[in-house]
Amino acid sequence: MTITARPADRLLDAVRGGAQIYDLGRLLTIGMPQSPNHPPFWLSMPRRHGDMVRADGGSAANDLLVMGTHVGTHVDALAHVSHEGRLHGGADAADAQAGGRFTELGVHTVEPMLRRGVLLDVPAVLGEHCPAGYEITPADLDAAARRQGTPVEPGDVVLIRSGWGRFFGHEDRSVYVGRDSGVPGVSSAGAGWLAERQVHAVGADTIAFECLPPGQGHTSLPAHRILLVEHGIYLIEAMALEELARDEVYEFTFVMIPLPLFGATGSPVRPLAVVSRG
């Protein structure tokens, strides 16, 4: 039998021609800002070089990692949020979580994403970073898409920049969380705008994607309900979007692969935006 090599894939041709990669994930470090609802990130080194040395002089170190699945840059699976006892598609949340695993809507069901990505740069429309507690409206999203010439299409991954990401590395970690000040983001109307366009996933540079009013923390998350529960649209939070905005990269190939954590409600991720150097 003669085996004939398949023609080179166009994506491979693009990579060979040179591509620029933007890392949209945050560095995972002990003490980084996070939602108080989730277990923190912790990394320790139980075995260090020299603890055990082989006869040939070789030694190895290894680590122990403990963290919640919604810490750092991460994706929310559809099992993450319920409303009035129901998950996306009407599944009973209590029944679905029996045994401590979501076999149907866990993050292991989130397929690797290789899709058109669009950055909606709201501060570029406003002329300033979104203030604390600012609600990003459908008018803001429309204006950003028009300004950039990047209409949102079905199946896209839409990333919304508020400018709040600049606080992720602030020495006071509570600033990024914004419990007292509030955090900018979309609310019900903005989530509805995204759902109407039948996007596949959405992301933001904030702790909870949502507009968080001052002093209210995570007491109400309507965008989570609309996007996850009602429309089955994945959420990606705590993204690094400043470099994309700086270089005015508004359309790109979006790449993201969640960890296949069976039955989990989310997964840490390292999303990429890939563009041709040409």
Image (tube, rainbow, N blue to C red):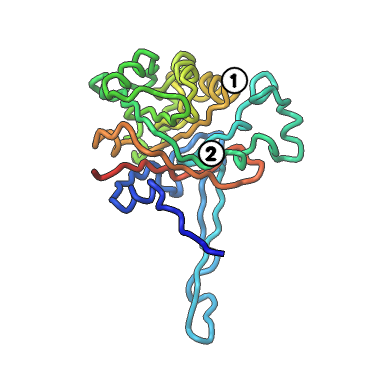
Q: Secondary structure at mark 2?
A: loop
The residue under the point 31% across, 23% down is 122
**Residue 147 place in picture, x, y as percent:** 26, 20
The amino acid type found where label 1 is placed reads Glu
Q: Nearer the viewer, residue 10 or 6?
A: 6
From this view, report whether residue 171 is shown above or below residue 187.
below
From this view, report whether residue 277 is shown above or below residue 164.
below
Q: Decide if residue 257 is on the left or right side of residue 80.
A: left
Is tag 1's residue or tag 2's residue first in the polypeptide sequence? 2
- Kindly tell me whether residue 232 is visible in this rendering: yes
| Mark linked to residue 265 | none
| Residue contact between numbered discs 1 and 2, judged by CB atoms under 8 Å | no
- Mark 2: give few (<14), some (14-19) or many (20+) Cα within 10 Å: many
**Residue 37 place in picture, x, y as percent:** 56, 34
Q: Decide if residue 165 is on the left or right side of residue 260.
A: left
Q: Secondary structure at mark 1?
A: helix
**Residue 188 place in picture, x, y as percent:** 49, 15
The residue under the point 76% across, 36% down is 98
| Mark linked to residue 230 | 1
